[in-house]
Amino acid sequence: NAGVTQTPKFQVLKTGQSMTLQCAQDMNHEYMSWYRQDPGMGLRLIHYSVGAGITDQGEVPNGYNVSRSTTEDFPLRLLSAAPSQTSVYFCASRPGTGGNQPQHFGDGTRLSIL
Amino acid sequence: AQTVTQSQPEMSVQEAETVTLSCTYDTSESDYYLFWYKQPPSRQMILVIRQEAYKQQNATENRFSVNFQKAAKSFSLKISDSQLGDAAMYFCAYRIPYSGGGADGLTFGKGTHLIIQP
């Protein structure tokens, strides 16, 4: 099982560019989410989805867009990259049933905005 | 808003010794879940242990155990017989059951960097 797969692993962008971070899971998990991790900080929730066609904002949603057209995929879009979005991004998924089920994380994408 | 506090930015322990990492949280909810995640230099997020707030019994997973004090809103992690492979960042995290009224996601502390001295 691949689990949660994030691509790319590393990316460098120029200010103002747009890009999409990909996230796919093969565990048939209903719930998916995106986090960012900055130095000295824990992970912070950007956006989440509780099923195909259903998305909502987390703690730090500004500058990011998401959509969920399938159960498997949950891409994160940066519309106009800013240096403040330099961070490591993690995608996670968990089953929709069983409230104590933990999030399973991808390996992260390190994004640098110049 | 819920907050999670890890008051120890860094801890150091001798190999084979026992170490306890602290975590406190602030919430008005009575039903929630608590987790400890380990992040080695590879930056993977690895689940160490979880605890349901409605369970009085402390969770254990091999050398890892927790001391869950619900009234004090405390959730510490004890690592027994520390091994070199335990060296990592450790994050405490909190989540409420998703019911449509709030976000489905984890609230993390800032982490504790655990160093294992050989």
Image (cartoon, helix red, strand yellow):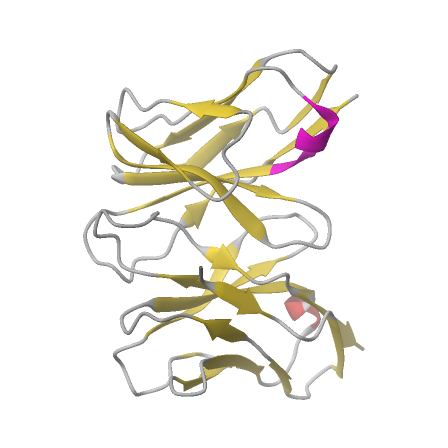
Q: Read off the magenta span.
A: A82-88
Could you tell whether B8 is left or right of A102 in the image? right
- Residue A6 appears in view: yes
B98 or B35: nearer the viewer: B98
Residue at figure coordinates x 43%, y 63% from the top left = B94
Q: Position of residue B59 (x, y in %)?
A: 38, 80
Q: Position of residue B92 (x, y in %)?
A: 53, 66
- Of residues A54 and A94, the one nearer the viewer is A54
Q: Is A73 placed left or right of A29 in the picture?
A: right
Q: Quadrant of the C terminus of chain A?
A: top right
Q: Is residue B111 magenta?
A: no
- Percent position of residue B12, x then y: 77, 78
- Image quarter in which the N terminus of chain A is found: top left
A78 relative position to B114: left or right: left
Q: Residue at x 51, y 25 (%)?
A: A64
Q: Position of residue B25 (x, y in %)?
A: 49, 72
Residue at image point 32% right, 61% down: B96
Kindly indicate the quadrant of the structure image that contains residue B62. bottom left
Name of the residue lying farthest toward the top = A17
* Residue at 70% from the left image edge and 52% from the top image edge: B41
Question: In the picture shown, does residue B101 fall above or below B69?
Answer: above
